[in-house]
Image (cartoon, grey):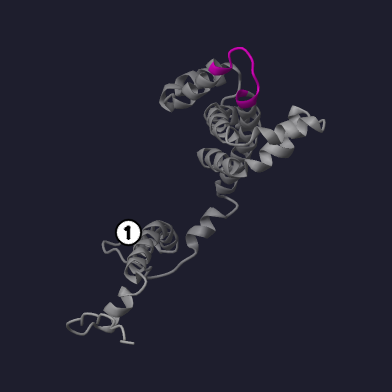
Amino acid sequence: MAEIAHPARPAISGRSTPVVGWLSRKNRGYYLVGYLLLLVLALWTVFPFYWQLATSLRSDVDLYSSSVTLFPQAFTLEHYGKILSASSTFSTQLKNSVIVSAATTIVAIVFGSMAGYALTRLRFFGRAALARTLIYAYLAPGTMLFIPLFVMMSSLGLRDNLFGLTLAYLTFTVPFATWMLMGYFRTLPVELEEAAMVDGASRWTILWRIVMPLSAPAIVVVAVFAFTLS
């Protein structure tokens, strides 16, 4: 029997360098470009945090110098000592910020989850109008509410008060939490809630024992937004 001759592969003119050969195998060139891009974006993101840390460790002479250096010329902890000293008001300001932020986050998640679940699953008169009103309230510019909120807090005796400040922040965070959780609650299968109802679970039990654990990603987003805003 005559042997079948396989077509010969065309010869590649010229010799490729080892780097070109390594990049040409399994699309490694694309991986290299992608990792380089990720490295540039990571440096772009981390640099502001590094600059804040480096600035806090610079001495006063280095801060007001005409020449800017990437690394501090003289490290010092004097600024941290001033902030953390007993005469500084930073500890009081930090405590107030933590109290207001934590309270705003907890209340926004609790009320936003209840309102979002009610507007998503329950059927009652005015549900669609109420949902639109919440969205419009969130989209309202904050500068338009400064004077009304100030007048309201002054008339209620809540000016220069942590409780009043928390209430002011809730006017922004609760509509956002409700709108955010409404969109996520719609993606959850209704069959899970129907099965729980067959077993005798109430709406309250379904919300806190089934819906809320499944909505952890949306709750984290709401918590981060409410905390950073406050």
Q: Give the range drawn in magenta.
A: 119-128
Query: Most extreme residue toward the right, as rendered?
Result: 200
Q: Does the magenta stretch include residue 13?
A: no
Image quadrant assignment for residue 4? bottom left
User: Relative to 210, is 142 above or below?
Assistant: above
Query: Most extreme residue toward the top, as rendered?
Result: 125
Image quadrant assignment for residue 169? top right
The residue sitting at 56% across, 46% down in the picture is 89
Give the image location of residue 118, x and y in percent.
64, 24
Compared across the picture, whether 161 is left or right of 172 comes to right
Q: Which of 33 and 196 is in front in this view?
A: 196
Q: Can residue 160 be seen in this view?
A: no
Q: Can residue 121 be seen in this view?
A: yes
Give the image location of residue 130, x and y in percent.
55, 18
Give the image location of residue 216, x and y in percent.
62, 44
Q: Which of 151 and 1 is in front in this view?
A: 1
Give the image location of residue 62, x and y in percent.
35, 64
Q: How crowded is mark 1: few (under 14 residues within 10 Å), some or many (20 or more)?
A: few
User: Relative to 150, is 200 above or below?
Assistant: below
Give the structural element (helix, strand or loop) at label 1: loop
Query: Most extreme residue toward the front, as rendered?
Result: 1
The residue sitting at 74% across, 38% down in the picture is 209
Q: In which quarter of the image is the N terminus?
A: bottom left
User: Relative to 56, is 205 above or below?
Assistant: above
Compared across the picture, whether 152 is left or right of 31 comes to right
User: What number of labels is visible?
Assistant: 1
Residue under numbered circle 1: 64
Q: Which of 106 and 220 is in front in this view?
A: 220
Q: Which amino acid does label 1 sit on?
A: Tyr
